[in-house]
Amino acid sequence: IESDGNCKEWEESGGCPIHKCTREHNVPFCGLCGDFPCEWVVKKTVWRDNYVEEHRRLASEYYMRNIRRAEISDAHRIAEILVFNYRLNFYPIFQNDEYYFEEMTVDNIAEKIRNSDFLNKTFVYDDAVVKGFIKINGNEIEKLFVEPVLQGQGIGKKLLCYAVHNCGAVQLWVLEKNSRATAFYQRNGFYITDEKKPEEDTDEYLVLMKKA
């Protein structure tokens, strides 16, 4: 990384092909790629027996930065992120004024979080300010939200990869009409299955996505 792909071992080829591949996939190093470990990189690294294990460990350490278990003091901030995202992403679909603007207030949601087991297996991205959170139940991701004005900075990807690498999360349900969420998970190695279920008390459906 420091040599920008220029090292003695690959001088004749004009640079390290693995480094070039990481650039093309827009990741800092190979272990963070959504396709890792791909067949190509395994063939390229036959000279290093522990390459895959080593990069999995590095990826795990990378995703642990700024991510910690949620605490009771995070309840209000988590509620803010949840409410803003629900109104932005789900209100246009369900058009329920009473629920989204009367029942779903930050204070109401924060109180529910404090008085439930919501914070169990919930992790926050905190780099001096809590900017996103992910809630996991077994091997399933239940919720993943990032502060709307901070989206597009890789925070959601870090939370998702943390759940995959560190918690064994391999599946989730996503609202069928939520094309932004579906596209995000597909970019990060999940695929849409044929399994669906109705969203409770609505005419909408959830689709199951799994890690490839």
Image (cartoon, grey):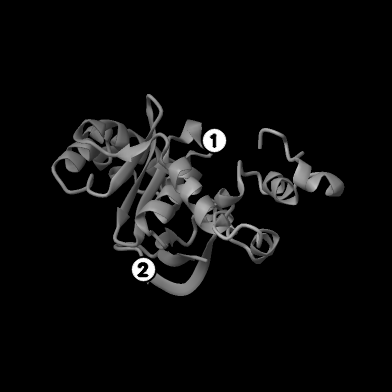
Closer to the camera, 33 or 178?
Answer: 33
User: Is any part of residue 186 visible from this angle?
Assistant: no
Residue 41, percent from left and from top: 66, 59
Q: Are marks 2 and 1 in contact (CB under 8 Å)?
A: no
Nearer the observer: mark 2 or 1; the answer is: 1
Q: Which mark is residue 198?
A: 2
Quadrant holding the N terminus: top right
Name the residue rendered at 70%, 44% in the picture. 23
Name the residue rendered at 37%, 59% in the picture. 168
Closer to the camera, 57 or 146?
Answer: 57
> Extreme bottom residue here?
194
Residue 183, percent from left and from top: 56, 55
From the image, tell me which residue sits under label 1. 153
Chain-order first, disc 2 or disc 1: 1
Give the residue type at disc 1.
Answer: Gln
Closer to the camera, 83 or 91?
Answer: 83
> Extreme top residue here?
128
- Answer few, some or many: residues within 10 Å of disc 2's Cα (few below 14, many 20 plus, some between 14 and 19): few
Give the residue type at disc 2.
Answer: Pro
- Horizontal side of 179 relative to 122 (left or right) equals right
- Between the C-alphas of marks 2 and 1, the distance is 32 Å
Q: Which mark is residue 22?
A: none
User: Is any part of residue 74 visible from this angle?
Assistant: yes
Q: Circle 1 sits in a helix, a strand or a loop, which is it?
A: loop
Residue 9 vertical position relative to residue 197 in the rendered view, above or below: above
Please tell me in which quadrant of the rendered image residue 47 appears: bottom right
Closer to the camera, 184 or 88?
Answer: 184
- Answer few, some or many: residues within 10 Å of disc 1's Cα (few below 14, many 20 plus, some between 14 and 19): few
Please tell me in which quadrant of the rendered image residue 113 appears: top left
Name the residue rendered at 43%, 59% in the picture. 174
Q: Circle 2 sits in a helix, a strand or a loop, which is it?
A: strand
Residue 156, percent from left and from top: 47, 43
